[in-house]
């Protein structure tokens, strides 16, 4: 396991198959999603992150599309998008050996817009 990594190194571990030149663009996409939709960030477990998002079909579509593309290059992620009772939530889970990636994601999601 890597220690003391820069935020971008943690964000894209060795297991990531996204070409290096595309990684800053993906980070910017997540930052845009977080800035525009995240209402609350919770960490119910070390390997799980729950993002409460602003409800709306466009936000759901953006979150789903981004999660699907991220799963394609970082297959260790599990994303669950829940739409229920007028709420929208994105749960992100990782295996224990990838928790530092989830830490970095949580840090980015929790930044003030």
Image (cartoon, rainbow, N blue to C red):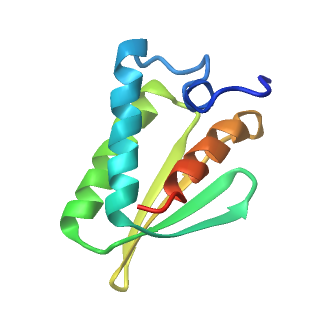
The residue shown at (55%, 25%) is 12
Residue at the bottom extreme, as displayed: 85
- Seen from the viewer's position, the closer of residues 5 and 20 is 5
Q: Is residue 45 above or below residue 23?
A: below
User: In the image, is residue 11 above or below residue 102?
Assistant: above
**Residue at the spot 24% in from the left edge and 72% down from the top edge:** 56
Q: Nearer the viewer, residue 98 or 21?
A: 21
Q: Nearer the viewer, residue 69 or 10?
A: 10
Q: Position of residue 101 (x, y in %)?
A: 63, 37
Residue at the spot x=36%, y=14% of the render? 21
Q: Give the residue displayed 59% in from the left and 52% down from the top.
A: 106
Residue 52 image offset from top left, x and y in percent? 46, 70
- Pick out the residue farthest to the left: 58
- Report the quarter where the N terminus lies: top right
For this rendering, which residue is in front, 80 or 20?
20
Residue 107: image location, x then y, percent: 59, 51
Q: How many marks?
A: 0
Q: Is residue 72 above or below residue 40?
A: above
Single out the residue that lies furthest toward the front. Answer: 112
Quarter occupied by residue 45: bottom right
- Quarter in which the C terminus is drawn: bottom left
Residue 96 drawn at (x, y percent): 76, 40
Using residue 81 as the reference point, say whether residue 75 is left or right of it.
right
């Amino acid at each position: 396991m890597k220690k003391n990594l820069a935020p971008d190194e943690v964000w894209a571990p060795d297991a990531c198959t996204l070409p290096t030149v595309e990684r800053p663009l993906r980070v910017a996409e997540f930052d845009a999603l977080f800035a525009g939709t995240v209402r609350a960030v919770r960490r119910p477990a070390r390997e799980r992150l729950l993002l409460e998002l602003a409800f709306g079909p466009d936000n759901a579509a953006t979150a789903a599309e981004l999660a699907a593309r991220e799963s394609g290059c970082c297959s260790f992620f599990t994303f669950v998008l829940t739409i229920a009772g007028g709420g929208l939530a994105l749960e992100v889970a990782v295996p224990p050996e990838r928790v530092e990636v989830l830490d970095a994601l949580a840090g980015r999601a929790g930044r003030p817009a």
